[in-house]
Amino acid sequence: MKILVTGAAGFIGMHTSLVLLQRGDEVVGLDNLNDYYDPQLKLDRLAQLQAFSNFRFIKLDLADRDGMTRLFAEEKFERVVHLAAQAGVRYSLQNPHAYVDSNLVGFVNVLEGCRHNAVQHLVYASSSSVYGGNEKTPFSEADPVDHPVSLYAATKKANELMAHTYSHLYDIPTTGLRFFTVYGPWGRPDMAPWLFTSAIFEGRPIKVFNHGKMLRDFTYVDDIVQGVVRTLDRPAEPDAAYDGKAPNPATSRAPFRVFNIGNQDPVPLMDFIDAIESATGKIAEKDFQPMQPGDVPVTSADVSALTAWTGFEPGTPLRSGVQRFVAWYRDYFRV
């Protein structure tokens, strides 16, 4: 298939593109290479993809309406994996307009491209952050998600609503995937696995928020990509069992689906830190801090719906995944 992957120079985008390329799909990768974190890391990820003859890269901002319109009209993609976004919960407190431009304006441009160019299926990144103030665990797609605690989370919830509108009005199959704390090689420098590992190697204290009393559904990137690709290969369909008098927010009479995608095994933050310490062979100096604004104490995924739909099964034990990440980090930075 001919597939557009937005955010192809990003963490999950690179890994997803690699799997699609390896199985023989034609991948057009889009990214704006912004400087939210070091663009060199993004260029190094792209270099992994540019070794494939069936990959092309286009530098373009999602918010560029004319550019996005031309891209879809010229390329005629069969399917789209939309992973580009302004990432980061805490940064949304500092620069909210970046989230509106990328996550809202940019998403409308993707939806319009799909609408006018007969795209067969749009798979897009949502986030576990949409559960916000929910305290019932594990999080289920059938739960209401009406209390986001960050603008980032609100934009991801908005994406799901926008996708449903286009599925309903224009019969476009759309599937949203709520990612749960993804980690692994080529990860993001603003996320805990990288922050902890770099601090340990550099002899700096690590900041441990909520005094370490956190549970996270850490999910290894290879498991995430398996779920993304399996979902891409099974376009959303109308739910024959949908009941408008008792609506399930994860399905519809339209070809629309929303799924959790996580490890379904929440880990105490201190256990995750212990795994990094074991992999690095060093003990971290810990600076215990209160909870940060916009954060939540627990994430826990019920992935039974995605398993039933695609056969998705996360299979990477935490310590194995952490060891692979730390080995990659050592190699990349020569430490």
Image (cartoon, rainbow, N blue to C red):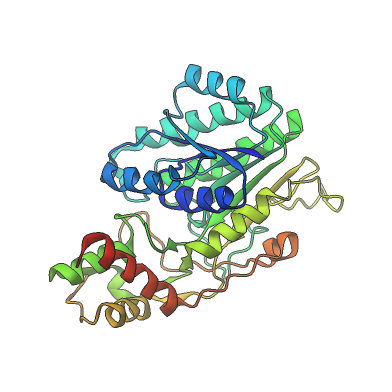
Say left or right for 274 vs 65: left
Q: Residue at x 34, y 54 (%)?
A: 188
* The image quarter in which residue 32 lies: top left
Say left or right for 295 vs 304: left
Q: Residue at x 51, y 40 (%)?
A: 53
Q: Residue at x 48, y 62 (%)?
A: 221
> Quick one: 217 or 220, which is closer to the camera?
220
Asked if 137 appears above or below 84 in the picture, the reply is: below
Say left or right for 84 vs 239: left
Residue 244: where, in percent of width, then height?
81, 46
Say left or right for 304 vs 11: right
- Residue 34 seen by the camera: yes
Question: Which part of the image, by quadrant, shows the N terminus?
Answer: top right
Residue 43: where, in percent of width, then height?
33, 43
| Residue at far right of view | 240
Question: Which part of the image, by quadrant, shows the C terminus?
Answer: bottom left
> Quick one: 156 or 75, which is closer to the camera?
75
- Residue 290 seen by the camera: no
Residue 28: where, in percent of width, then height?
53, 35
Asked if 2 appears above or below 306 in the picture, the reply is: above
* The image quarter in which residue 61 lies: top left
Question: Total number of numbered labels?
Answer: 0
Residue 329: where, in percent of width, then height?
29, 64
| Residue at far left of view | 203
